[in-house]
Every structure is written in C-alpha cells, then in structure tokens.
Image (cartoon, rainbow, N blue to C red):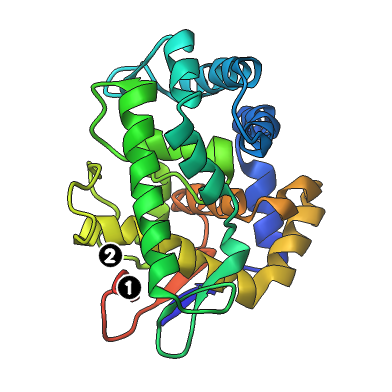
Amino acid sequence: MGLRLAGTVMQIADAIKDFPRDYADDYFNVRPIGQRYVAEQHPTETVALELATALQRVLRNWGAGRRGAPQLRKEQEIAAALLDTSLHSDVTKLSLFSITNLGFDHRFRRLVNGTHSSEVLEDFDMRLLSVLRSFSDLVFLDNTNVTYPMKALLLVSGLMPALDSQVRTGLGIAGLKGVNKTQFLLPEDMRGSDAKKLTRLPFLLGQCWADYSAQFQDGARQANAAALIQEPGRIFDILLFMQARKEKLPLLIFDAGRQPWYDLP
C-alpha cells in the first residue's frame, strides 16, 4: 500500500510549469514571512501584522470572500489571532515537521524521523486539527470546511497540500477514497475517519517523497523552480492540483491495501 509516482520527471516539470503563475508567486510572497513568524520565540506585532496582511491578500486571490467561500476577517483581527501564544506555539511546533520527516514502516505504522511513537503521533494529530480549527475561527467568518484553513496552514508552514476542490479531485483520481466530496467539513471527532484523512495524508505523501525524491527534485529543477525542492508539501499541492486536469495522465497513483488508506496507526 502506498502512493506511487506514475509520471516521468518531464511530466513533473511540465505540471509545475503549467501551474498558474500567479498562484505560484503568491505562495512565495507569504512563505518567508511565515518562516520569520515561527522563528520568533514570541511573535511581535510587526511580523504578525505583516503576515496577516500577506495572508489576507493571497487568500483573497485564492478565492476567499467569493460566492460559496468564507469571508476573511479584518487584518487587525487576523494579526491579533497570530499574536495568541497558544496558536503561535502550535503553528511553530507543526512547522518543525516536514513531510520529509514522515512516512510509514512495513507494518504500515506511521513514523516520525524513522520512529513510531504513539505520544509524538498523538501530539501531531492534536496540533494539526487544533491549528485548522483556530485558523477557521480566527482568520475567517462562518467557515465550516477544511479548504481555507488548510490554505492558510500551507502558506504559513508549507506542511501539506490544501484540500481545495482541485486537490481533492487529484487525490480521487489517484485512488484515495473518501476525499473527493463536495464538502469536506472540519472534523469534530479527532478519531473519526475525516480527521484521520487529514492527519494521515502527510505520512502517505512523506513516504512517496522518500521513495521518489530524486525524480521530484529533478522535475522542479527542469521547471526552473528549484526553490520548490525545499517545499515538498507545495510540490504535492501543485501536482495534485494539476492531476485534476483530466486530459493529463495521472502523475500519482495509490496502490491500495486491505485496509483503508487512512487507517495508518
């Protein structure tokens, strides 16, 4: 069981080059500010406001505030949320993870830096779901879906793809069941199936990166996007987005096992 690269290095490069240029630029307009935000032991008002302004601008470019999408809160409200020490701590600790640190073993147990630790995994799951809930409540108004909180998390931490409609479609084409649905609501139950889909996906992607990192990196270089090599979560976000364009051959395919893909312990 696992996610397999079905495309060639050239197909990876073409997908990256064909990805909308403004979306690509938006990401790198926010990520450096997010990196400075999590690098601070205590967030300063200056960085919090700078990040809030950048987030608001890019999230609006990515559809927030349009029909069917949640409204954004005011810049000062978002900045105040980013100054919250609990949220800052959770985002900072999540940002210490990269999907390059994540994977699973031959028994399909999740691994962090090659080790299966129930305590570490439970903490990861709790923080990921907590941050998504906090972003939902504090960055947006009347939000119920995972899409925009995940976009905010992607921009700040680079951890994992945001499950917008295109990425969900791409995952569905890959063969991951239970993701490509009209609405993916923020899960209320941390141990429910939808919560597991969010917390297990980075490990599935991490193992895929470990298995095919050379091809992903070569594809980024051939696309003249070497900066993406340090952003594997964003690479998967781009490839799954582009996979939703059905005229293209699937780049990523899931080889199913006996258990649901999100039942990784």
Q: Is residue 8 above or below residue 85?
A: below
Q: Is residue 164 visible?
A: no
- Residue sitting at the far bottom: 106
Identify which residue is drawn at 36% across, 64% down.
122
Mark 1 crowdedness (10 Å alpha carbons): few <14, some 14-19, many ≥20? many
Q: Quadrant of residue 78?
A: top left
Residue 231 placement, left or right of 204: right
Q: Nearer the viewer, residue 111 or 175?
A: 111
Identify which residue is drawn at 61% across, 37% down.
38
The amino acid marked with disc number 2 is Lys
Q: State the mark number for residue 177.
A: 2
Mark 2 crowdedness (10 Å alpha carbons): few <14, some 14-19, many ≥20? some
**Please, what secondary structure does the residue beneath circle 1 have?**
loop
Question: If the image is split into quadrants, where does the C terminus sit?
Answer: bottom left
Q: CA distance from mark 1 to mark 2?
A: 8 Å
Comparing labels 1 and 2, the label whose residue is closer to the camera: 1
Q: Nearer the viewer, residue 123 or 234?
A: 123
**Please, what secondary structure does the residue beneath circle 2 have?**
loop
Q: Is residue 191 visible?
A: yes
> Could you tell me if the residues under marks 1 and 2 are in contact, i.e. CB atoms within 8 Å?
yes
Where's residue 82, x and y in %? 49, 25
The residue to which callout 1 is attached is 261
Where's residue 115, x and y in %? 53, 79
Identify which residue is drawn at 64% across, 43% down.
18
